[in-house]
Image: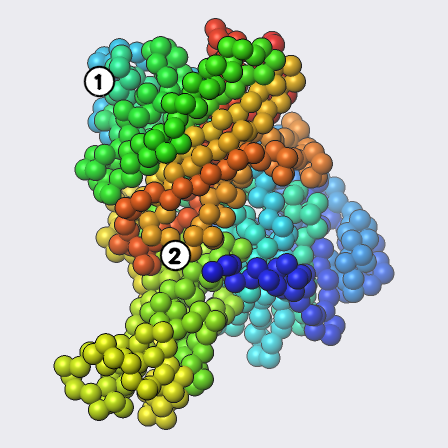
Amino acid sequence: MKNFDAVSHIKGKSIYIDDYPLPEGTLHAVVFDSKIAHGKIVNLSLEKAKVSKGVSAILTAKDIPSENQIGGIIEDETLLAEDEVHFIGEPIAIVLADSVTNARKAVKEIEIEFEELPIITNPREAFSKNSLIAPPVTFSSGNVSDAWNNCDTIIDGTIDSGGQEHLYLETQGAISIPIEGNKIKIISSTQSPTGVQRKAAKVLGVPMHQVEVDVLRLGGAFGGKEDQATVWGVLSALAAFILDKPIKLVLSREDDLRMTGKRHPYSSDYKMGLTKDGKILAYEVTFYQNAGAVADLSTAVLDRTLFHATNCYYIPNVKATGISCKTNLPPNTAFRGFGGPQGMFVIEAAIVKAASALGLQAYDIQRINLLKNNDLFYYGQKVENSQAISSWDSAVNLFNSKELIEKKNKFNKNNSLFKKGISFMPICFGISFTSSFLNQASALVHVYTDGSVGISTGAVEMGQGVNAKIATAASKIFSIDITKVKVESTNTTRAANTSPTAASSAADMNGNATILACKQILNRLIDFARTELNASEEDDIKIENEKVFINGEASNLIWSDLISKAYFGRISLSAQAYYRTPEIYFDRDINKGSPFAYHVYGTAISTVTLDVIRGTYKFDSVKIMHDFGKSLNRNIDIGQVEGALVQGIGWMTIEEIRHSANGKLLANTLSTYKVPDIYSIPKEIEVKFLENSENRFGPFNSKAIGEPPFMYGIGAYFAILDAMNSVRPNKEFEISAPLTPEKVLLALYS
Ligand code: LUZ
Ligand code: MOS
């Protein structure tokens, strides 16, 4: 089974926002944004722009009919700036014209004067000035202050990780169409159709049933459209509502790079105490999160950093504090891993430092601290079905890590111009939204009279293959060929009050809802077939491969006839079902609970060759033992692991988001912001399926896949660091991610 859209993607027939045929009279929107990072607007003059060629209207905050507010978790985000701007790229006005070109020309005619205010771009500076998104949050267990006395070694340090551009192939955008009766239909490139609907209704001052959001598919998202698609959807809806015209708003790549938030950069302080044989007794960490100018999802992202601060290790005494710092950058947002990678990176850095202090190898410390069943995560959840040790040990055995290490050592003995490095990266990622209420989903299933099936859920297809997985689940329940199943667009009139497609959990939750809905219909069909075949209550009726069986023997009733007969027999062929993840809870008063349905585990072994003269590096191989549960679709899942790994490597190595001191994005094109390409990805990526992993929370025992493998990429950083240690064995490197070739070179020779 391939991804559903493979053929239409390759033929260029898949439709994205920019491809929709437009209704007559559609106006094109271009956003006018702030050119300074912090200041008061003292004068905004639209006169010249309004008479520019082809312009129909220019809208500002004053034109908003109801509330100028789109903040999701905290209500601190205006749709259009009022008197003050807080980051470069903040929307101030929206120009509507007969073409994109004319709208762009008019944007240049808008005159604005600012009174500049002080700019903060660094989270620690923000903290020192008490510029915070929310009060600091601390999770803890045991007692770190007491534990330090029992440690043989205590190390501490500071380490930073950088931002990351989502670089979805399809930029942000939406088309809004006015419909009779003051209704608006928004075709949006969003992970959160309900989010767009809710905010559009609020801004327009209409009930939610007046706003319909439809999503066919996204050209990638990676978290960048969990919250930040809303701005563009609502802006287009605002213009459609006021002007009573269809509106198309698609960001150019340049606008998208400048206006949208990225992965949160973090600066973190850590302290770790261990016994002399490497058992971690205590870990204390403070995370300074660079949130940007408004909250967006920052507090939720920070929660996940805290949940994953100990990665897959059992540590009895932990204190982790997260501080979401307000700076004058575009609001940083969800990005695959959602703060988890930032937390896991710090503890891995601490372990490497501890290893050198103790004269051990990092992998010795990693291995002896891995989580076992019935250990407690430091936030209180009991470890069940841990695959931390099994995935580590099978990686070590299957990939023969001993030999990989010996080869590396031999190579390094014999070469001075190139050095090899190796790293082990075990992962553990919690599955469920950390905001428990979001863990709900629904499905609407129709069987049509010819036996074909249409399914609507809240899941958004963004290239990750969720539609193929949902269709697989339905085809298994009905035991019909998958070509009979279609997964429809995601639409707020067919699936209401949906959670964003995020947290790796869309296939789990919407798949489970689909299974429940299909089972309702199946039960009706079985009862109907029993009557139809004059069978008794004791007879066992089953549908298998589109045939009805009585007591294991095929009858002459096939699927399509059964459906047609059921219709004439007035049996309902539709069902709606609701699923909520059972057993999860988290108590925010004490920051303890069991917030995740389950965890995904795995281990990656990465090897790299460093060019000692140039500071450049090439990854020889990344070998991964991953815990898929019972995969619903092996091809899709391998694709997710490979893609996530490479994206993780990019974050750790060459992707560098840089801003000037006045808050301007410097890496603002794809020539200055480099993402991994076919030349920089590992020469070999080997992905193995961990055996004997079950998961009662996933459809047909599958496990969530989207985010966990991103964190294998963290191994890239430590593999390079290992190679650097072979070049300068006695040097303590004070460096941070991304570990660009420039930084490697400077660190080696300064
Ligand atoms: N989004 C969210 C997420 O709202 N809550 C989460 O816990 C989460 N986790 C991962 C990715 N997106
Ligand atoms: Mo996400 S980081 O939108 O699962």
Which is more N-terminal, label 2 or label 1?
1
Residue 101 marker: none
| Picture layout, residue 340 above or below residue 510 | above
- In front of the other: 245 or 495: 495
**Residue 372 figure quarter:** top left
| Picture layout, residue 123 above or below residue 19 | above
Q: Amino acid at mark 1?
A: Asp
Report helix, strand or loop for mark 1: helix
Locate residue 207 relative to residue 184 in the image: left or right: left
Report helix, strand or loop for mark 2: loop
Residue 146 marker: 1
Residue bearing mark 2? 632
Farthest residue, direction left:
538
Q: Is residue 660 visible?
A: yes
Q: Report the quarter where the C terminus lies.
A: top right
- The colour scheme used to paint the residues is rainbow
Percent position (x, y) of residue 677?
Answer: 63, 38
Q: Is residue 122 visible?
A: no
Locate residue 419 relative to residue 494 in the image: left or right: right
The residue shown at (60%, 48%) is 168
Locate residue 306 relative to residue 18 in the image: left or right: left
| Picture layout, residue 115 above or below residue 505 | above
Percent position (x, y) of residue 149?
Answer: 23, 12
The residue shown at (64%, 14%) is 613
Instruction: Give the label, 1 or 2, closer to the camera.
Output: 2
The residue shown at (60%, 76%) is 179
**Alpha carbon separation for disc pair 1 and 2:** 47 Å
The residue shown at (73%, 66%) is 27
Q: Amino acid at mark 2?
A: Leu
| Ligand 1 closer than 8 Å to label 1 CB | no
Tally of marks = 2
Q: Is the Cβ of the residue at disc 1 closer than 8 Å to that at disc 2?
A: no
